[in-house]
Amino acid sequence: MAKHLVVSFPWSSDMALKVTNYLLSRGFNVDHVILETKQFPDGESYIRYPVDLSTYESVVIIQRAYPEQDRRLIQTMLAIHAAKDLGVKHAHVVLPYLPYSRQDRRFRDGEPVSLLTILSLINSLGIDSLITVDVHKPEAFTAECGKCVNLEPFALYANYIGSSWGGRPMALLSPDLGSLWRVEKTSKYRGISYSYLEKFRDRVTGEVSMKPKELDVRGKDVVIIDDIIATGGTIMEATKILKSLGAGNVHVIATHCLLLNNADTRILNSGVSSITCTDTVSTNYSVISVVDLIGEALAGRLVP
Ligand code: R5P
């Protein structure tokens, strides 16, 4: 029976242990190890496998790549390269949150398409799969990357909505057109009505504005669903509009909660009743776990 090694960085070991247990429960022969990491005095990254890799068929490298995205991406690449270099046949990489995924096109002349830069670097190391969750734009992620796998958490959201706020008049809202497909998919599981707002972002200052719009939300609780909360500007603008239209409780579910500069406090102060996040980034709001999604995706890719 093939032996596999789930490898985590210290800040991802809670998730890696759960993925390991999932794979064990599915009958795979799996060990888990935490990589040694340190930073050299000049700032460069160091990693080391504290086990002999020669007996393993594959490694699964699990890296929560936020915060410190640049450093953590380099660490990931060092870990992939070392594993392949030390003779492991297969390398699967799990970046539950994929940094640089929002720069998936050239918005202004002279910019890189950063998503493609990151993908081509990781792909060049000879990976078998790169697994992420709710990437900003799946078409851009998979377009030139046959090994890229995007996992969708929308069934989890639908269940969470049903168990947390079921029984009240409710609507789902996408804060922009780009996330409309997310609420559409979530709605399919529960048949809740949904709508969207039109958002504009100043590409230089990053400031967000939204076009006022008539929405059928008076007296209804609204769940805003988005992939990322970064500054919180998007959620706060959407909430302002919802409240002005007479919405009841406004809840927010986001996959990747970066919550920059205490965005959570500002969002809650702006009238949002609750924030719910997944564990792709570790936060106080990470109550929806994507572990089983990741475990399932790996189970379909590891040699039994
Ligand atoms: C953008 O299109 C994304 O889907 C999110 O709406 C955005 O990244 C949120 O950023 P912020 O919280 O800074 O408004």
Image (cartoon, grey):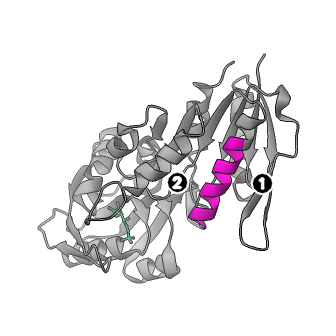
**Could you tell me the amino acid type at mark 2?**
Tyr
Q: Which mark is residue 258?
A: none
Provide the residue designation for mark 2. 97
Indicate whether residue 80 is drawn in magenta: yes
What is the x, y in percent for residue 98? 50, 53
**Could you tell me the amino acid type at mark 1?**
Ile
What is the x, y in percent for residue 206? 32, 76
The residue segment tinted magenta is: 68-81
Nearest to the observer: residue 179 or residue 121: 121
**Left or right: 8, with 154 as reference point:** right
Residue 144 appears in view: yes
Q: Which mark is residue 47?
A: 1
What is the x, y in percent for residue 207? 30, 79
Residue 18 appears in view: no
**Left or right: 49, with 295 as reference point:** right
SS at mark 1? Answer: strand
Give the vertical position of 42 relative to 63 (above or below). below
